[in-house]
Amino acid sequence: MMNPAVSSPLPFARDELAQMRVRYERDGFLQIESLTTAEDISRIRSLIDPLFERFDTLGSSAVDLGGPRDPSTPPRQPEVNDTIKLAPELRKTKAYARCREIARALLGVPVGHIFDHAIYKPPHNNTATAWHQDAVYKQGPVPLRAVNFWIPLQPATIENGCMWYLPGSHLAGLQPHHVIHLRPGGETADTRGKSFAMDSVDESRAVPCPVALGGATAHDPLNAHYAGANTTDGWRRAWILHFGAFGKLRHLLHPNSVTARLRAIANR
Ligand SMILES: O=C(O)CCC(=O)C(=O)O
C-alpha cells in the first residue's frame, strides 16, 4: 500500500513501462505512484472546481450519481462529464500527457482520448460508487480497448473514497449487472442515464488503492472496481481520463461500427 505523501514524477524508463504492462495485463489495474506534480494537480483543480461551482448551469454534462434526491438538497455525488470540452486547458496538463504515454505503453498501439469526467464526493456524502465494470456503460458494436485513469485531486484514502479493485477480474469478461437507480441531472430531477452494480462480487479478494497527491490508478474497462463513500470532513475530488486504442477513430471506422450505423439508417 502506498504512503499518502506527495509524489515527484520522473520520466518513465522503458523498463518501468514494460513492467507496468505486465502487471496491468495480469491484474487489470495499476497503482501509479508518481503520475504528476502537486503544481499540476493545483492547475487541474483550478480548471475543474469552477465547473462544479456552476454545476446547475451545465445542462446534460451535470449528473448526480448519488441517485434520486429532493431537488432542494445538494447532489450527493456530483459528476461533470466532458470536462475537457468545458475546460480545454485540461488537455495541456502534465497528467494528460503522462496518462497518454502510459496508455500507449500498456496497449502497445497509438492511443487517443475517448472520454473524461470528474466525480466529486462532498464531506460525509454517504454514497459509495457500486461495484461495476466500466464496460457495462459502453456496450457498443466495437470491443473496448482502453485504459481508464483515476486521478485524485487530493490524497485518496480508504476513508475518503479511494478506488478498490478485484485483481484479474478483467479476464472473466463482462459480468451480469443490474440497474441500481436513475441519475438525476444537475438542475432538475430529469434523469440522465442509469447507474449499474454487478450482481455478485467476492469482496474478500478486493484490494484498496490509496494514492498520494500526484499519484493515480489505471484500470482495464473490464476490471471490477468500487469506490467507498467519503466519510471525512473534506471533499474527495477525482478527475477521470479514458484513452482508447486508436482513439475515437477506431470507434468511427471499425467495420462493426460502420455496419451498425448502416443498419440503423436502413431501419429508420
Ligand atoms: O470516483 C468514483 O467514486 C468512482 C470512479 C469510477 O468508478 C471510475 O472511474 O470508473
Image (cartoon, helix red, strand yellow):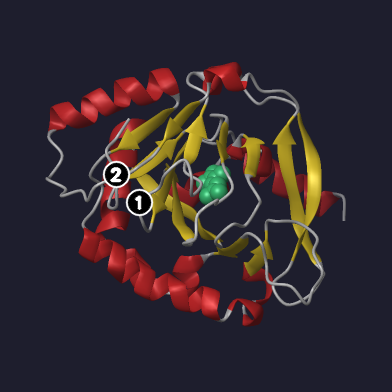
Q: Is residue 221 above or below residue 65?
A: above
**Res. 155 mark:** 1
- The residue shown at (67%, 37%) is 136
Image point 26% across, 45% down: which residue? 101
Which quadrant, please, contains the N terminus? top left
Question: Horizontal placement of 63 versus 207: left or right?
Answer: right
> From the image, which quarter does the C terminus lie in?
bottom right
Choose between 252 and 129: the one closer to the eye: 129
Residue closer to the observer: 246 or 5: 5
Q: Say which residue appears at 12% left-offset and 35% top-offset.
A: 13
Image position of 224 (left or right of 155): right
Task: Provide residue 25's location: percent of width, then percent of height.
Answer: 39, 22
Residue at the disc numbered 2? 4
Sooner in the amino-acid sequence: mark 2 or mark 1: 2
Q: Are marks 2 and 1 in contact (CB under 8 Å)?
A: yes
Which amino acid type corresponds to the residue marked 2 in the rendered image?
Pro
Q: Provide residue 99's location: percent of width, then percent of height.
A: 32, 48
Within 10 Å of disc 2 (Cα), the crowding (few <14, some 14-19, many 20+) is some
Horizontal side of 102 relative to 175 (left or right) equals left
From what the image shows, is residue 105 above or below residue 125? Answer: above
| Label 2 to label 1: alpha-carbon separation | 6 Å
- In this view, the residue farthest toward the right is 268
Dot 2: what SS? loop
Q: Secondary structure at mark 1?
A: loop
Identify which amino acid the numbered label 1 is placed on: Pro
